[in-house]
Image (tube, rainbow, N blue to C red):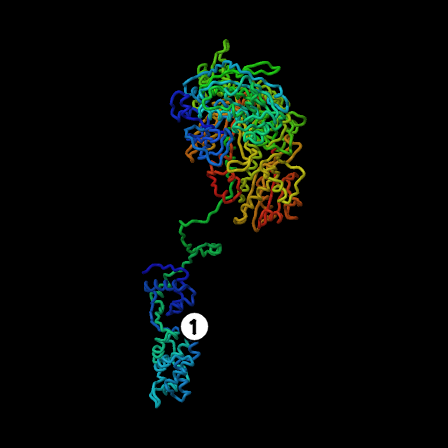
Amino acid sequence: MPIVNIDLAWLNRLLGKQFPTETVRESLEQIGCDVEDLADIQYSRCPRCGALVENPIGQEEVRACGICGHESETPFKPAGKKQVLRLDLLADRPDLFDVGGLARALRGTLGIERGLPKYATRPSGHTVKIDKSLQNKDSFRPFIACAVMTLPPIDETSLIAIMKLQENLHWGVGRDRKLASIGVYDLAAISGDIEYRTMDPDKEPFVPLGMPGKKMTGRQILTEHPKGIAYAELLANHKRYPALVDSKGHVLSMPPIINSDETKLKLGTTRVFIDVTGISQAAVTKSLDTLVCSLCEIGGAVETVEISEPGAGNRMTPDLKPRSTAVDLAEAKRWLGLPLDDKSLTESLRKMRFDLQPVAGVKGRFSVSYPPYRTDIRHMVDLLEDVAIGYGYGNIEPRLVRSMTVGTPRPEESLSDRGRQILIGLGFSEIMSLPLTTEEHQYERLRMPAPERYPQVANPKLKAYNVVRTHLLGGLFEALRENRRRPMPQRLFEIDNVVALDDMAETGASEERRLALVEIGRESGYATARSVMDSLLRELGWKPEYTAIEHPTFVPGRAAEFSINGKALGIVGEVHPEVLANFGLTHPVALAELSLQRVF
Amino acid sequence: MAGEILLNEAAYTVWQMVRDHGPIELGEVVKLTGIDQTQVAATATEAGLQGLFEIAEREREELVVADGAAGLLAIGLPERRAAERLIAASGELPIAEFIAWANANDVAPNEAFKWGGARGWIERTKGDGGPQVAVSEIGRQSLNQPDDDERAIQAALANGGRIFLDSMKAGAAGTARVNSLLGKRPELARIKKRTERILALTDQGAEAFQTRIHRVIERNLLTPEDLESGAWREIKLRPYDVKLAAKDVYPAKIHPLRKIIEQTRRAFLEMGFAEVVSPMIESAFWNFDALFQPQDHPARDMQDTFYMRDPAEAPLPGEKGVRNLLCEASSGPFRQKVPDTFFDTDAKIVEQVRRTHEDGWETGSEGWGYAWSPDVSKQVVLRTHTTAATIRALAANPNPPGKFFCVGWTYRNETISFKHLPVFHQVDGIIIDEEANLASLMGTLQEFYSKMGFGRVKFKPAFYPYTEPSVDVVVYMESRGKWLEMGGAGIFRPEVTLPLGCKFPVLAWGLGIERLAMLRFGLSDIRELYRPSLDALEGVPLCR
């Protein structure tokens, strides 16, 4: 999970009051933010674009700029230090990704300001026209939402904060720019109305961010520009590329890859244009709403943009009117088990930045207004969580349910436990091995022919894990190999489930609990394996009948299958010397495996 | 009257020897009994101090032949060869001629003069032509036979290189001659003075031996023969230094990780939970869809989840045949009163899950707003959590009260590192109850974690996709002196419970067993848990 660095001094400025760091930290944890630590962060300056770059924690030097993509052989020049809180991002709460959003939430929990934050908008007068080619399969990116914002003149700190928020929204909402991607522009560099359309990959070259003076076509960007290479995958199936173009025909950006260099934010910029494009309307709206609300918290004001779509009419984005839902006191009490009343329910939610209005005529029911960025509210239970957090997890009195239920172990577990006790009594030590293996380990090294079908994984990252084990022998032989230089004899066992392909089983494979054991030593052989197995079965109260079998893992004539009440249950024998050689073993091995019955 | 004397076997044998053969020289006792000289001497000294042995000391002279003496005698001593030469020259030679001969024949002239003179064989005379060397009359007579000292050396050589002078037959005069001739001739021999101790019982000793001396047999080990014969009564087992380290031995043991799993199972069983299981090879429906996990959720990505090549597809609950198969599979010897995962399910559940994903169905939710695909749901995965088991149990037992848990293998498509394995154990528990709520969730977790050995537990808000509210359990670890996040918990969302037919809040929580084990055993590398090295396994005591 990404970690975000929150400038502590800035956070305190936004809170309007200096709080002890420990209080801030506890407050953050109470709302579910994991504070990794408090750290000093070093900043460096990119020699090409002049941007301030955050050094990764513990790293003295930086040689790559995340903003223009510049990479240099010599380290960037240091540019000062800041004290930051390092937070794990909560994927579900993009409104807590930045200093503005966090300050807004903390003002609620610290009691500085409660209830719904309201965001006013006024029209900007700008229009974005969507071309319908974006609906085509081979140039698909149909959704767009835009805003204009007036911000306090951008300085280096706010520039980094905006970039980071954009990046983290790409991660948390945009699924790494796939569902939605954000562009932020200096409005002063844009002329007139904007068209969101597609362009020929080889025409309409423009100067992309980070390559001052170098005009590139869309295709060149995808093959030569670091950001283009990194995200080329997203346009792999596009015959034409999405583009925002202003009234003078200047390409402003090529979503979801890069903006033009000309429109980039500059120090001192106060008016910005923001676009979010994507393939999911929900992700696009959520990204824009979250972004502009957070920027309002650091002093921004929002203006709407008219989106004109052929066949769909005109609409204004963003829509920052509060959303509304309802909460029931009775349901809150049932779900949370807290001694709530109208007042404490209201107070808890107001602390979490909601507004409540009693619903006339329905006792205990409230209409709840919530801000547009709380897109995680999909159900009343989502509000109930906020009630609990507002109430304070630490204030909840734990208790137990009173109903009577009976503890019941699974029968194969009880049987396994008995088998384990017997084998430990016989001097066998338990091992545990992983249930994933390979065809070679499962069959070839044990001289078994691989069957035509066995349970196989389709997409393992490691080739060593492409088979789910169908018996327990592999792990035991690996263990013997590991211990081959230790004094002999050695006795080991393992009890676990194995799987078998089974067309009669619900998911196509059935599972069985098994017990397997090995003994290695000068004296080990069929006779010792038999003794142990006889002993185990006697203690379990099972009467075996042994039948000679031919099995490639065993010495011919020294292997048997045994059955209980006519049902074949296991095998016992002396291991074939070739198998011993395969595992580098220099003593004979007695081996047995039996089923402790079907689990499914 | 002196008290009883206990002698060990060796000392007793020395006593016997002295009684039977005394007076006897100490060295002789050593030779005859084979007992170590120091032990014989110690026995004798102790008995002597008690007046039980009479120890007579006598000094003797012993001739010890030098290396190379035999060779010198064989060539002939210089004075003997000189005398022979002089006899051959009819008794005398001018001194110059004699020296010329001596030099030519490797005879040292001054040795010949010195020892020839000492024996009285060779003299210097004055002849007509100047100084001469002559053999004496004694010399002429003596040359036919070896002199006393030569004889003594021969006798010593025959006796292993040593001989006591008083044991020679030479008599007092002969002995004195040997002494004077060999006293300063180390190339031939040395005369050494030796003190011998002659042991004999005193009267008191003889009496004591009969009355108050007892043999004690000392041993390190007691043998079955000693026990059978009754000899153990006379045997004294030697005392040991009980503080010395002993050899290490280890018992055969339960695997450390298994022990934690068993502890976890016991905690749940004690709290009235029924244990359930579900297949590791699981359908995406039960692993993801039933938990309201959207079909495009990144966790379902090939990057994170193992998909099966074979079996590749599982029918959805309620599809033709599946229901019957499930029932049949559960009717084996392990059929139990608590319904496990094989339950009467039908197409209704699938339909309700589909609707909930698409538009929220009757759950009060908006759903995910996409078209749910049955094909995606039929994919077969290696289960990514044991919640797949508890969710099946919930579908089978939607009415309260019910408490279920499952411990088992879970899989994530990871590479191997000190932090991650692609397969590990999880435990999941659920409570279906009219009183299930956030407060009883916290109470249950507190109880559970206290059974797991964590007396101090804190809760903090968390965000998990299928629970609301969600809780992270933070426990205080005494051994590390700090608070650690241990597991997640929450109340299943209505989008999870309602489609399965459950109208009550359901408490759910899970815990990674390996993480707990690593903390308990102080490991920093998860792979250590599965290393089958006996050294490592034996090194973890059961009490940990």
Residue located 38% across and 76% down the image: B167
Residue A531 is situated, as x and y percent measured from the top left of the image, at 59, 46
Residue A405 is situated, as x and y percent measured from the top left of the image, at 53, 26
Q: Is residue A367 above or below residue A453?
A: above
Residue B137 is situated, as x and y percent measured from the top left of the image, at 37, 87
Q: Amino acid at mark 1?
A: Gly
Viewer-side residue, A444 vs B259: A444
Which residue is labeled 1 in the image? B160
Res B384 → quadrant: top right
Q: Is residue A130 above or below residue B78?
A: above
* Residue sitting at the far top: A361
Q: Is residue A352 visible?
A: no
| Residue density around tag 1, few if under 14, some if 14–19, many if 20 or more, within 10 Å | few
Secondary structure under the numbered disc 1 in the rendered image: loop
Q: Label 1 is found on which chain of the structure?
A: B
Residue B254 is situated, as x and y percent measured from the top left of the image, at 52, 40
* Residue sitting at the far bottom: B128
Query: Residue B250 vs residue B99: left or right?
Result: right
Q: Name the quadrant of the C terminus of chain A.
A: top right
